[in-house]
Image (tube, rainbow, N blue to C red):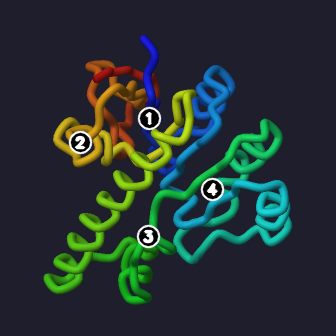
Amino acid sequence: MAFSLVFIGDTHGFIDDFSKQKEIIEEINPEFVLAERLENLSLDSKEKFENILMKKRISNMTSFEDVKKLIQLCFEKNINLIGIDFKNFGFDDNLQKVIINQGKCNKEEEEKLNKIIEKRQKRHLKIIKEYQNKTKKPAVVIVGCWHLRDDSLLMKSLENYKVIFPCDKNGNLLFEPSGDKNISYCEKVK
């Protein structure tokens, strides 16, 4: 079965996410890789790739090191790498500090955070749909595992996809470190 989208769950660093991303990207050789952690950047030309590789800066919320290998892989393979989020994930200076310092949100910050998360999900969906129609090949979409829950906006709103996600020994989607050293990958399709 040919899928128009292949999602890869990203743990944001509690396991080596890149090795699985590289494996899937090399297997599919997509025209587009859509990535949440690239925020609002679109690397769709040699000049844009060279510029980001020279500047080595993404944003306050994403360090260059977090996405360096993905950027280099897509550059070497001549694959467009498209950010599907907002700059700094849409967080204002105050929320950035709370999140970076892993602080506890107060009620007002929690409400603001929930509104931003909803806007982010809608933006992800809009951009994914846009690129889904720009290519005959499957687009690879790299998003945090939380966005791959069965009841998430992406999973409920899209069709014809495969999801590859880190899971525990029972096949449960992992959102955070589980203490289990034997993390594997599971797949689901729609």
Q: Earlier in the sequence, mark 4 or mark 2?
A: 4
> SS class of the residue under badge 2?
helix
Q: Earlier in the sequence, mark 4 or mark 3?
A: 4
Quadrant position of residue 107: bottom left
The residue where tag 1 is placed is 7
User: Is mark 4 in CB contact (under 8 Å) with mark 2?
Assistant: no
| Amino acid residing under circle 2 | Ser
* Residue toward you, 30 or 103: 30
Q: Nearer the viewer, mark 4 or mark 3?
A: 3
Measured Cα–Cα span from mark 1 to mark 3 = 19 Å
Residue ranking furthest to the top: 1
The residue sitting at 59% across, 34% down in the picture is 21
User: In the figure, is residue 44 to the left or right of 114?
Assistant: right
Quadrant position of residue 27: top right
Q: Which mark is residue 92?
A: none
The residue sitting at 20% across, 39% down in the picture is 156
The residue where tag 2 is placed is 157
User: In the figure, is residue 176 to the left or right of 28?
Assistant: left
